Each structure stands twice: as structure tokens, then as C-alpha cells.
Image (tube, coloured by chain):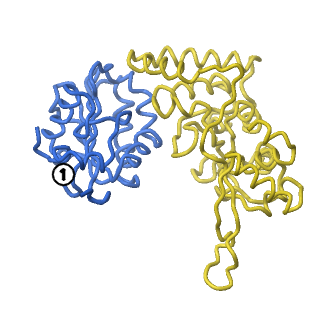
Chain colours: A blue, B yellow
Amino acid sequence: MTPPAHAAHLAQLNVARLRHPLDDPRIAPFVELLDPVNAAADGSPGFVWRLVEDGAADATALRPAGEDVIVNLSVWENQEALWDFAYRSGHLEAMRRRREWFERHVEAHLVLWWIPAGHVPTVAEAMDRLADLRAHGPSPRAFTFASSYTVAEAAGHPEAMAPNAG
Amino acid sequence: MIAVLQDPVRRRLYEYVAAQGREVGRNEAAEAAGVARTLAAHHLDRLTEAGLLESGSRRLTGRSGPGAGRPAKVYTRARVERSVSLPARDYRTAAELLAEVAEQAGLDAGLCAAARRRGEALRGSGAPCGGLEEAMEVLAARGYEPHLEGGLGGSGGPGGPGGSGVAEGAAGAVGASGPGGEAAATAQEGVPVVRMRNCPFHAVAERFPPLVCGMNLALLEGLLGVDGPVRARMDARPGECCVVVEASKSNAD
């Protein structure tokens, strides 16, 4: 049985290695973009949830992937909604300047996967999906924009949406 | 497909519909092309059969229920991309491969520098672009399909009269807002900006957005100049080019 599309949401994690500490003047233009871009995300069609540190406006102080690696973990109704926010909103300007602030990635730095609607992904789960993508390449369990899987495709693989699989 | 556009009336109709960026009814298209409704309908349907337009039906008046009348046939430009190359060339694969490698190697800065130089070379003369009107002509010539938004008390394009060229109609609109445009530049809503319906790099931009959109911005900065009366900046929206052109803030005094 294929679950209806609204029963699944798309989770995304991306990691970015800072070239300088967040309080460095060279990173200031990025820090200035955080609040407006996060506000734009919160107001975007199809936005469901994003990770924030307790008592903070964002997740930049959480460093689960390394001392100089910031993470972005969020949930969207579908892939189009996430794509439009990532590349067709004020977020694109931040993406355009990414080389000024972040190291180039040799490994995958973005991973997408389907979750049951209502599930809030944990950082550990997200890191697990990224590790899966890096180790095995794109699959219904862990994929990218360029190698994406639909909800229906993921539903054909019971492990794809199981939060604790792997 | 080229043959389909050979007929001048048909070509005017196609260009009009494409330039509107919304659904266009037969009456409106006929008026714009200066032909009778039945002739326009014939050509619009030929264009649809050839896959250059898409058609649907819509109640244009916004009324519904009894008395609203029969739904009218409306046309939009087909989203599918067409290209003709004789003899066969495949620049798209080359572009995608080069972009993939540039992305992996993190060559954004070098690509943007090259794009800016290319824009400057295309501009030719030393002077930066003189205003929004001129910018629209330059952008139209490069296939961006520019249209003016804001500064006219509404963002929706007037469905009114006009020739086949969007540049003509919108350039008139720039003139209408006149030098007073600068006074409006303080209010966010009233600021006229040139937006572009077409991304000439669409296929590669979809695959490598930050890289290719950054390249596009740099190209336009070179083309229009960065220290003149207008400036290009990134303001991405779904379904349009990621760049807008507006009056430079420093130029207001």
C-alpha cells in the first residue's frame, strides 16, 4: 500500500564547515542573513519544522558534526517546497556566497529522506542518513535533489522511512 | 516547428502570449495582434498543436455559477524548451558537464569573474546602463523577457492594449512613473524593479542553482555596470530569473 502523499514529509539535513568562527568579521555577512532567511523559511509554503537550539533562534551553536561544522535540519511537505525555498527565495543569495564562508565539501553535504508526517527527526537520525548517503550513494533511505525518490518509491522500501533503521 | 512561426500573424500572437506570462484569451490576443478573433483563434490553435502554446479553459470574468457564461479558451506558452541547431550541436551537455566540475571544484569565484568580464565585453561602450528603460532593452535582446513590476500601484500586468513587444509597453510604463520613481524608492512596495520571466540558462541553473545563478548575476552586473544608475541584484522567486534590476540607491541624489 502506498500511503497518501500528505502522510509523508521530507526531511533535510545539510552540513557546512565554517572557514572562520561565527564571530569572525569575515562571517558577519552570513550571520546577518540568518534571521531574515530563517524567517523566510518559517513563512515559506510547505515549511513544517526546523531545528533550533533551546532558547535560541537557530541551530548554529549546535555542532553535532564537528566543532567548526554548522548544521541545518528541517522538515518540508514535499521536495518542491524545499527546492523553492532553497533556490528560489532570499536563501539563494546566501547560497551564492557560500564559498566565502564555508569550505568546499568533498563528501555529500546535503541529504534528504522521507519521514512519516508528524515525526520530528533527531540530529542523530539525520547524521545517520548523511552517513548512509556517503557510504552507499543515493537510495530511498537517503538521497539528494539530483537523485531524488518520490514518497511512493520510498514506500516500496519499508526501511526508507523507518526512523531507527540502519 | 520553425515553419509554424513563419507566418507573421502567428508569430505576433506567439510573442504576445509568451510575453504576458499568464493565460491569454482569444479576444485579447486578437486585439494585440491586430487581427480578427476567428483568425487569431485559428493561429492560436495551430500553435497549440505544434506544442509551442498550451491551452486550457477558464472563466475570464471571475464570475461563476449561472450567468457566468461558457468558459473561454486561454493560452500560455508551453513550458517545454525547444532548440534548433543545424548541424546538430549539443552545448547543453557540455554546459552541464562543465558546471558539474566547476561545482565540485568550487570554482564559483573564477566563473563569476569570467562572467563579469563577458558582460562588460558585451556592453561594449564604457558607460554603464543609463536607466531601467535601457536595461529592459538590453535584457530583452538577450532573451530575459523583462517586465516592470511595482511603481505603478500594482504588480499585475495591465491586460490592456499594446503591441507584441513587452519592452515597448513596459518602457512606456517606466516613462509614466518618470523621475518621481526616485521619491518612491524609499517605500518598499512602490519601487519599480525589472523582473525577468525567462532564465536563458534554465536547464543548468536548475541543476546547479547557486553556481549558475551567481554566474548569471555577475554577467548582468558586467552588462549593466555596477556603479551606474541601475544595479542588478539577486531576488529569486519561483518560476522567474533570479535577478532583478532596479535604480541604484546611490543614484537617488
**Horizontal and vertical percent for residue B169?**
79, 48
Q: Residue at x 41, y 33 (%)?
A: A94
Q: Give the image location of residue A154, x and y in percent.
A: 26, 46
Q: Is residue A63 above or below residue B34?
A: above
Q: Nearer the viewer, residue B73 or A36?
A: B73
Q: Quadrant of residue A28?
A: top left
Q: How would you rate the neighbour count of disc 1 (Cα within 10 Å): few for under 14, some for 14-19, many for 20 or more?
A: some
Q: Which residue is mark 1?
A: A120
Q: Find numbered disc 1 in the image and state the secondary structure of the residue it sits on.
A: loop
Mark count: 1
- Output the chain of dot 1: A
Image coordinates for residue B174, horizontal then vertical, percent: 76, 46
Q: The N terminus of chain A lies in which quarter of the figure?
A: bottom left
Looking at the figure, which quarter contains the C terminus of chain A?
A: top left
Q: Quadrant of residue B67?
A: bottom right
Most extreme residue toward the bottom, as rendered?
Answer: B66
As drawn, is A31 to the left or to the right of B118? Answer: left
Q: Label 1 is placed on what type of residue?
A: Val
Whole-percent x and y of residue A112?
A: 28, 39
Is A136 left, or right, of A24 in this rendering? Answer: left
Residue at (66% x, 42% y) in the render = B194
| Position of B59 relative to A106 (above/below) | below
Indicate left or right for B100 with A111 as reference: right
Of A63 and B108, which appears nearest the observer? Answer: B108
